[in-house]
Amino acid sequence: MSDYEEKYSYGDWSTEQESVAFIKDLLIRSQLFTIYNEVKGRLLFLKPYQEQTGMRIDMVLSPKPKLCNAGWDRGAIGLECKKSGLKLNHPFAQAEDYSNTVWKLPMGFLFMCEYSFLWPFHKMGGFQASQMAQKKIGTLEYEDDQWGGPALKFYCGECKVIKYKFRNDSIEIGNLNFGNQTGSR
C-alpha cells in the first residue's frame, strides 16, 4: 500500500451517510456492540484559547457479552465515520479531542472512551502509527479476502485491537499493552 493510500479514507462512499450505513450494518451483523448514534459530549479540559463547543461522535460502541467473553475489558469505544477520499489530518484531530471528551448517553450515563476509531481508514504505519498507538486513536477497516473471508479490523497504529471474522464468528483481541506511558521516555 502506498503512503498516499494509507493516509486517505478508502472505499466508494461519496457521503458520510453512506459510509455510516455500511459500517453500521456490519457492526449490527457482528453482534459485538450495542450502538449509540450521534452521542453528544463536552470537552473535559480546554487548551489555552480553545473554546468549549458541543462535541458529537457518530457512534459509541458499547461491548456486548460476546465481546467481553472474548477478553475485551476496555469499555465502550468511539467511532467517527467519514466519506471516502479524505485525508487523515482532520479526523485525527477530531479523535484527539474525543479522547478528552465526556460523553452522555440518552439515559444520562456519563463516561469517557479509552479508544476512538476512524472509519474507513487502513491500518497506519511509521511515525503516524506510533502517534496513534500512544493516543489510543485507531482505524477501522473492513476486509473481504478469498482466504479469510469478511472481517472487521480495529487497529491503533500497527497494533491489532480487535479482529472479528464473520465466516467463523471468531474474535481476536490484540495485545493492548500500548499507549500507557506518560512523561519522559
Image: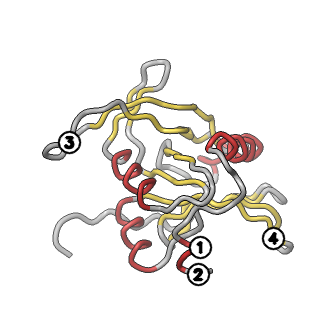
Which quarter shows the C terminus?
Answer: bottom left
Does 96 sit above or below residue 49? below
Q: Nearer the viewer, mark 4 or mark 1?
A: 1
Q: Sequence order check: which comes first, mark 4 or mark 1?
A: 1
- Image quarter of residue 170: bottom right
User: Are circles 3 and 2 on residues that touch, CB within 8 Å?
Assistant: no
Label disc, if present, on residue 2 of the rendered structure: 2
Per the model, the C-alpha gap separating discs 4 and 2 is: 19 Å
Asked where in the image residue 121 lies, by quadrant, the reply is: bottom right
Residue 59 lies, in percent from the top left, at 55, 38
Residue type at mark 2 is Ser
Pick out the residue farthest to the top: 107
The circle on residue 5 is 1
Q: Position of residue 149 (x, y in %)?
A: 83, 65
On the image, the x and y values in percent for residue 7 come to 51, 69
Question: Are the residues flagged by discs 2 and 1 in contact, CB closer than 8 Å?
Answer: yes
Identify the residue shown where x is 73% and y is 64%: 143
Residue depicted at 67% across the width and 44% down the height: 32
Q: From the viewer's perspective, is 80 left or right of 44?
A: right
Q: Which of disc 2 and disc 3 is earlier in sequence?
A: 2
Residue drawn where x is 59% and y is 58% of the image: 140
Viewport quadrant of the N terminus: bottom right
Crowding near the residue tagged with mark 3, few <14, some 14–19, many ≥20 C-alpha atoms within 10 Å: few
Residue placed under numbered mark 4 in the picture: 145
In whole angstroms, how far apart are the C-alphas of marks 3 and 4? Answer: 44 Å
Q: Amino acid at mark 3?
A: Gln
